[in-house]
Amino acid sequence: VVLLVVTLGLASLWRSAGVQIRLAQKKDDFISAVSHELRTPLTSIRMYSEMLEKNWVKSEDKLAEYYRNMRQESERLSRLIENVLDFSRIQRGRKKYTFKAGDINKCIADVVEMMRPYAAQRGFTI
């Protein structure tokens, strides 16, 4: 009987350790993905600001485009940071979401418009 209880206890500990290891791996994967997503707009902002700082851009149209891109990337960065903070609040039970009906077509159109400049930079048309 004692051996059975010890065996069941060890099996339970083993299972619990496996769950903890998987959770730690998922957390590491999440942090890695978030880091990558944060780096992308930062890299763009840095590139545009360096080009502007070194006066490599002479065209007024290009100047306006680069400033617009920097603003869009900084807005994207702000949204990403806010999403991470929201996720953290949800995990700690400090933020609750309420769901409501919405226009999925408008949502998709907004996302397409937001991604259009990135696609164009890479030679794609949406």
Image: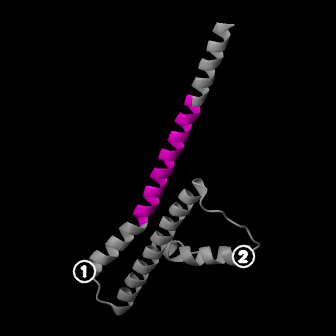
The rendered magenta stretch, by its main secondary structure, is classed as: helix
User: Which residue is located at x 51 percent, y 70 percent?
Assistant: 79
Relative side of 36 to 126, left or right = left
Report the residue that reaches farthest toward the right: 101
- Do we see residue 123 in this rendering? no
Q: Is residue 107 one of those drawn in magenta?
A: no
Q: Residue 11 lies in what quarter of the image?
A: top right
Q: Residues within 10 Å of mark 2 (few under 14, many from 20)?
A: few
Which numbered marker is on residue 105? 2
- Image coordinates of residue 74 in percent, x first then y, are 43, 75
- Image coordinates of residue 82 in percent, x first then y, are 51, 67
Q: Which residue is mark 1?
A: 53
Q: Which residues are magenta?
A: 17-40
Which numbered marker is on residue 126? none
**Mark found first going from the N terminus, 2 or 1:** 1
Q: Residue 107 lies in what quarter of the image?
A: bottom right
Q: Nearer the viewer, residue 55 or 32?
A: 32
User: Which residue is located at x 34 percent, y 76 percent?
Assistant: 48
Q: Amino acid at mark 2?
A: Asn
Q: Residues within 10 Å of mark 1 (few under 14, many from 20)?
A: few
